[in-house]
Amino acid sequence: MSDQRRLIAHLLRRSGFGATQDEIDIACQNGYDATLRSILNPGESCHIPDDVIQRYHSDMHELRYGDSSAAYWLYRMISTQTPILEKIALFWHGIFATGYSKLNNARSVLNQIDMFRNFGLGKFDNLLLELSKDPAMIIWLDNHDNHNGSINENFGRELLELFSMGIGNYSEDDIKEASRAFTGWTLGNIEYMAMRASKDSIWPYGRIAWHFNYDKSDHDDGIKTFLDNTGNFNGEDIITIICDQESTARFIARHLYDFFVADEEPVPQWNYTEPKNPEAVDELVKIYFDSDHSISAMLEAIFLSDYFKQSEFARVKCPAEIVAGTLRISESIQSPSDKIFSSGNITGYMGQMLLNPPSVEGWHEGTEWINSGALVERVNFASSEIGDISNPGINSLVSRIIESIQVTKSGVSSDELIDVCAELLGAAELSDSIKGTLVNLLDSEGTITQENQTELQNRIVYLLSFISSAPEFQLT
Amino acid sequence: MSLSTTSKPKSVVFVQLTGGNDALNTVIPYTDEHYFDHRPSVAMDPNKVLKLDQNLALNPNMVGIKSLWDQGKVAIINGIGYPNPIRSHFRSMDIWHTAEPETVLNEGWLGKASRAIDPKGENALTSINFGRGLPRALSAQGVPVASVGDLSTYGLFPNINDEHDRSSALNLFSQMYGGSGADMVREFIRQTGVGAYQGADILKTAPENYQSNIEYADSLMANSLKDAAQVMFSDLGTRIFYTQRGSFDTHSGEVITHANLIREVSDAVYDFQSDLDEHEYGSTNLTVIFTEFGRRIKDNGSGTDHGSGGVAFVIGDSVNGGLYGEFPSLAPKDQVEGDMKFNNDFRSTYTTILDDWLDLDAPEIVNGNFEKMEFLRS
């Protein structure tokens, strides 16, 4: 495989959920830089049309339930033509982690995901402002209980600690003052919504989506001192001040590096450990300020950098990447199918129930995705999807592999076959011992010649299913 | 008190009734007119209920648990709950799982208990969930927990039906994971894979060695408990077993749905306890049945909506059978927003199990000090 093709495959895995060989062909014709430009200028989200999904799944009209809603998002991850929008939504979903468990209102969580698609690549100030007005976030962190004269610090604290600056860069007084500034940022019709929620009727319209309302009469308009600035600040002012802090730029830069380049230490340790690549973070901080806080500009710098191009397989795939990525390869869900539910649940069995992170800290990523139960689920899911030649994507992948290898009179070189399979599957280079095991397996079954196509196909599928069981397939 | 001649480690089997089991149709105040006034559509026939005393009775479908009650092996904990009840399934279950009603926590109480039992995580089978995925209750950092969907097919490559093919696949897997990883991350994944493979290998022996005269009912609950019994009798060091059955979310058609579910659970628990007794594990195990919340006192014409104030059961030969907690009054003046008022914190029950049964330091695990209940024989 050419270097360019390898890099483009890497880019398509990290900026989305991987691509088929045909999609990689097109990207290679356009070149790396042009491919990147079109990724970062996605335009409107494009996926299996909602009306087609809804015709098949009656429960995906209103999306009131957690499992249907997670499955619906998975449809979009699998079928999207604009994968960066789903990837950036997943990125922010992990940081601004809002969970269905407390809200009991999936529509509002999905609206938040949509907001991430719309604002997640833009100016960070706008994203934080939308987040502060987001109804799911308001309920998740109790800002509807944050009143003039009796503040609830939950949102104010996490806004600084988990959503922007990181711990150690502000005082407890700053939390209180920020909380005062966000008093009155609540839901419309709150008593009525509370009444509905307490009934939690499963009947139609029982769980209607919430909307934001600014209640001026409950807002504390007094003078506040926040991070050495003084004034009668409202929420917007607090966000402007936060977004001008270097600590914010640094925190977001490290998160981007962690998610798009290479696994960092867990977030709670960031205050005590240096980033893996301090120069990269410094450079991203500079770009944040030079670009007027543009996330898209930071991503562009990442994807063009040498450190990104050298970071193949430096991350452990998250469950959504395993499931959506594998289904994009196997193409086993190309139109609405009940299989979407089992696939949606499987991300949960692997430890990542979409729309329902365990707490506001989000998921613990990197090697923490891997435990014995989760690894069994990952191996079983990927190997059964990829080991099934009746899946259209696998069928064409096998043909593709046969085209790329030399079949001589003396048969096929096992070594070469294994390398090609691993590369086209998007797995890291296999360790010598695994390769040795697989070579022995192939050699023990005798040589194959071109005449015996069916046997060749079978062996390739078997090989692919084992490569998808290897540690190397767990990485991206 | 039953004297155990062996020194078997004590174990607990948790049975989670997911969806909010209707406490009032489980333990029924069959002489209370408020019960019948509030439940014109779902009240049980007072002539058919299984009487516990002058006031309370079990649902007519709970013949199995009633029989264990008659043997003095069942503690019924009425009025169990937590302050400021929450009627969201997920959040309420989270609270039961993390033993923390106020703030959202990551780690589950049984995950923490498992860590306290086996601090270095040396036994991958200290805690086992029978079901897929990991309930929050069992989740804690660095604590290995096996999740067994079906003991007979547990492990890798369950889709490969041919036994010979599956065995060569497993063999290949163990060879692939047998080398050493190219870096720390790959090495960690490799070791985890070896652990998963070995755990599955050990668990595979459990059904092979199992013999019993008990014929379990044919149901999901019975299958899970039979799997648990097989593992327990293999003495693999498992202390915490977990399983669940749902959905008890009976907003409509409650009379039929709830009857079927509660009968399934009750029959399965009876079979399980009989199996334990036959194998002399009856006095070293507790079976704990719980749910995330009870349901409204008043029915909605077909079922009942989410409420608070629940009921839990602790069952075993070492249990001091009887009624615990207070049965909440149904009089309108005593109701809380149309619900039964809780009178004992679920963490009291947890504390009793942790402290008096598993011999662990309870306050750290349940996030505070709670008065113990007296449902264990001393």
Image (spheres, coloured by chain):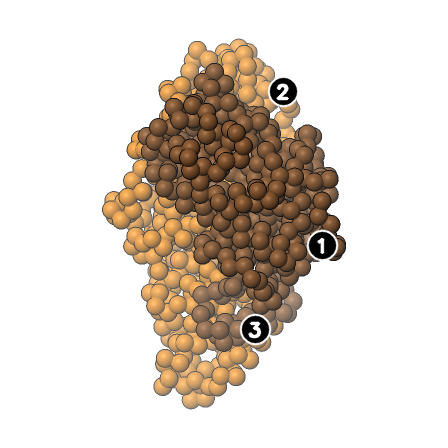
Chain colours: A orange, B brown
Residue carrying label 2: A173
Give the residue at x 42% y 38%.
B48
| Same chain? Circles 1 and 2 | no
Given residues A40 and A318, the one toward you in this image is A318
Q: Is residue A71 above or below residue B309?
A: below
Residue carrying label 1: B8
* Three-letter code, disc 2: Asp
Given residues B38 and A84, the one toward you in this image is B38
Which chain letter goes with mark 2? A
Give the residue at x 45% y 37%.
B49
* Three-letter code, disc 1: Lys
Neighbours of disc 3 within 10 Å: few (<14), some (14-19), many (20+): few
Residue carrying label 3: B171
Residue B87 visible here? no
Q: Is residue B122 above or below residue A159?
A: below
Labels in figure, total = 3
Distance from disc 3 to disc 2, alpha carbons, whole Å, reads 61 Å
| Same chain? Circles 3 and 1 | yes
